[in-house]
Image (cartoon, grey):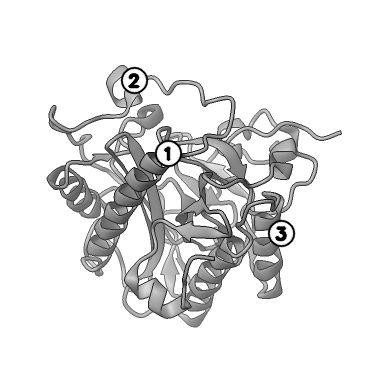
Amino acid sequence: MRGKFTYCVYHAAKAHPMFSHVLSRVPTMNKQIKRGKFSIVLPHKTTPTRVVPSFIQKPPYAVTGVVGPKPVETEIKNEEQIQTMRNTCRLARKILDSAGKQLKAGMTTDEIDEYIHEMCIDNGAYPSPLLYNNYPKSICTSVNNVACHGIPDLRPLEDGDIINVDVTIYKDGMHGDVSKTYMIGSVDDKAKQLVKVTEQCLYAGIEQCRPGQKIIAIGTAIRDLAESHGFSVIPAFCGHGIGSVFHSHPEIMHIPLGDYDSQHEIMKEGMTFTIEPILSEGTDMVAILEDDGWTAVSEDGSRSAQFEHTILVTSDGCEILTVSEEEIAKWGYKEN
């Protein structure tokens, strides 16, 4: 019998038997222990939560402090909503690409957060992570052994780091979500391969997106490609439906989990969702740091990489709403 699966195992890891061994604890590791050519990182001091001006349209949770229940059904977008999402996603991509050009050794992730926060405001957008379930910053920055949901802080980036910058914005009633892993300075060959294969896995999942296809095909393609290169997929985090709600149905697992009804949902024209695989060079197990309740770190200190796009299912394939011009040239992307 298939079980039911809620968005992102992160929120249910302690209760769900499949992931009962994902413990909310700090792994046995010390700050800044050198492992090869990269540093183990844990949270540092950070700065106060940034303020959003009153003239910026805010999602309901930013006003009420409460994330409401997800819609029961998967949202199918109409043409007006799709065009709004295109605009929002293009802006999210523009902001990410601009921030990516600023990255360098010595820069803190808090400075990245400040840069993106101000760029959101300048473009009339709300940074979606801010105050979502009390998340204290405007973006997520996950460095080296931090798998995801890293909170920007005052640790300077180091030569050899890899960092995922995850940008989601809310504008004109719609969210757009995109992320990319960047390499800082001289990165070792293993990290380069990890980053390269993770991006390939994202596109392997995207290639499965079309009407009539089951959601589980995305995770199967990602898992198969990752394992063929000797990397593991971290299963505790998933993609999600997105639109007027930040996180909604369908759940997009990055490994095939055939026992869950959500993974047998059929893709339909007008669906929008994210695909955001996290690949690890070591264990696929993570721990959530009790100090902040958000930061997910690998249990063995290994590095991970992540890439993310927001996808629209079209009548005969899909459209990558957050694709960049550079990616179009690199991947030869066109609407499936």
> Is residue 151 at least partly visible in the picture?
no
Residue at which label 3 appears: 220
- Residue at image coords 25%, 66%: 103
- Identity of the residue drawn at 45% across and 56% down: 309
Other-residue count near label 1 (Cα within 10 Å), few / some / many at <14 / 14–19 / ≥20: many
Q: From the image, tell me which residue sits under label 2.
A: 65
Q: Which of 165 and 312 is in front in this view?
A: 312
Mark 3 burial class by Cα count in 10 Å: few <14, some 14-19, many 20+: some
Q: What residue type is labelled 3?
A: Thr
Q: Calculate the distance from the C-alpha at mark 3 to the C-alpha at mark 1.
A: 25 Å
Q: Position of residue 104 (x, y in %)?
A: 24, 69
| Residue to which mark 1 is pinned | 243
Q: Can residue 127 be seen in this view?
A: yes
Q: For the point 77% across and 32% down, which residue is it?
A: 3
For numbered disc 3, what is the local secondary structure? helix
Mark 2 or mark 1, which is nearer the start of the sequence? 2
| Helix, strand or loop status at disc 2 | loop
